[in-house]
Image (cartoon, rainbow, N blue to C red):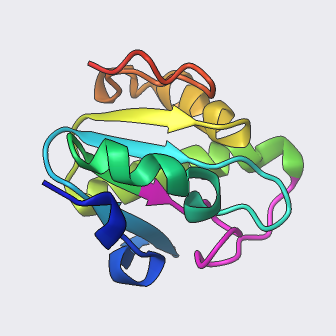
Amino acid sequence: MATTTALTEEGTSKYAQAGDLKIHYNEAGTGDAVVMLHGGGPGASGWSNYVTNFGPFSERYRTILMDMPGYGKSDPKEMHEDYRNRINAKALRDFLDTLGIKKANVIGNSMGGATAATFAIATLHVGRLCAFPTIPCLHRLC
């Protein structure tokens, strides 16, 4: 079981090649996967949005804080705002494939919630998601 005080950004920092993008993420814990997707504000990253949730979730779940393309330590990706959700959804799909995650709970804040919904609906991957609440709806995990 993970200890909240032992988790640091540096100690949980990892990278995965997801399609043509190198995606940064922080990971801790074991069990069912919970992927947390940050919002799109200036300086946003998985760590900056979810650091206070990371420890508690990692005590029960394999918790992953994914930096979306162009944010945090992930590769930059030039994109038009109209296509951001689709590009992010593809990056999420490729990321899950790279990590071998067949089914995940996805929690999204703002842009992250839109990414999760796009992943589930537009890319027809509803079966891969167990739940995708947007903040502040953290109460429903399967």
- Residue 95: x and y in percent read 39, 58
Rendered image quadrant of residue 72: bottom right
Range covered by the magenta-colored residues? 65-80
- Image vertical order of residue 99 relative to residue 101, above or below: below
- Residue 128: x and y in percent read 30, 29
Front in this rendered view, residue 34 or 58? 58
- The answer to whether residue 36 is visible is yes
Front in this rendered view, residue 5 or 12? 5
Q: Is residue 106 magenta?
A: no
Quadrant holding the N terminus: bottom left
- The answer to whether residue 94 is visible is no
Residue 12 shown left or right of residue 21 in the figure = left
- Residue shown at 56%/47% (left/top)? 37
- Residue shown at 39%/21% (left/top)? 131
Residue 23 shown left or right of residue 45 in the figure = left
- Residue 76: x and y in percent read 70, 76
Quadrant holding the C terminus: top left
Rendered image quadrant of residue 113: top right
Q: How many marks?
A: 0
Residue 29 shown left or right of residue 57 in the figure = left
**Residue found at the far front of this picture:** 5
- Residue shown at 35%/27% (left/top)? 129
Magenta: main secondary structure equals loop
Residue 41 shown left or right of residue 77 in the figure = right
- Residue shown at 60%/79% (left/top)? 73
